Amino acid sequence: MKWIVITSPDFLSGEALFIDRLFCHGLDVLHLRKPGASYEDCRHLLSEIPCRWHNRIVVHEHFSLAAEYSLLGIHLNRRCPDVPEGFRGHVSCSCHCLDEVVAAKPHCDYVFLSPIFDSISKQGYSASFTDNDLQQAHVAGTIDHKVVALGGITSSHIPQIKAWGFGGAAFLGDVWSRMNDAGVDEYLDTLRLLL
């Protein structure tokens, strides 16, 4: 399973160092998502992240950063729904229903489906799918290796995410809430082993 972390929407003190730490613990892909942030602010964060990780970073805005920093690719969402003309790299996108997954999978390297569980970082953002919905979607082939679970994901959810057939798990609130905890390295090692 692919292990993905989405950045906190806000810029955090020590963020680049923590991102380096995530990659050192086996993180597969980082999604740089800073809604409304300027090009220069995103560029500054990228410049602070060791360049050895740049080819494992996906941007949600300011798509020209992908070429400038030789990033893995771009992520489409409601704010930035279109692939730039001539872009030939990695593309992922956000989906919020199973019909969107069916439509997007042929055009993407992978898609996020959310919210799978009640969100940790967004108050009132509740799970949109039942266990039965997700089981049936897996049996039908809608959920497969190209679909990444997002929304309220913690280490305790990984066995269920695997059972539903997801190809990966994307973390946001759970990982960033632990950024300054003494036991964060042990937790990150546990995540890597579970995935």
Image (tube, rainbow, N blue to C red):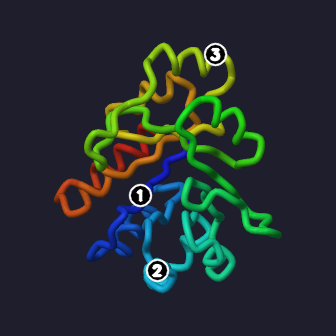
SS category of the residue bearing label 2: loop
- Numbered mark located on residue 82 in the image: none
At x 60%, y 21%, the residue is 138
Which residue is at 50% across, 60% downward?
31
Amino acid on which the number 2 mark rests in the picture: Ser
Image location of residue 3, percent across then percent down: 49, 48
All told, the count of numbered labels is 3
Disc on the earlier residue, 1 or 2: 1
Helix, strand or loop status at disc 3: helix
Q: Earlier in the sequence, mark 2 or mark 3?
A: 2
Crowdedness near tag 1: few (<14), some (14–19) or many (≥20) residues, C-alpha within 10 Å: some
Give the crowd class for mark 2: few <14, some 14-19, many >=20 residues within 10 Å: few
Give the quadrant of residue 155.
top left
> What residue lies at 26% left-to-right and 61% top-to-bottom?
179
Query: Does residue 57 appear anywhere in the picture?
Result: no
Look at mark 2 in the image and give the residue it sits on.
Answer: 38
- Residue 91: image x %, image y %? 68, 56
- Front disc: 1 or 2: 2
Q: Amino acid at mark 3?
A: Val
Q: Are marks 1 and 2 in contact (CB under 8 Å)?
A: no
Note whether residue 54 is visible.
yes
Single out the residue that lies furthest toward the front: 79
Measure how far apart labels 2 and 3 are at the Cα level.
42 Å
Q: Position of residue 52 (x, y in %)?
A: 56, 75
Residue tagged 1: 25
* x and y percentages locating residue 158 in the rendered image: 41, 33
Tag of residue 139: 3
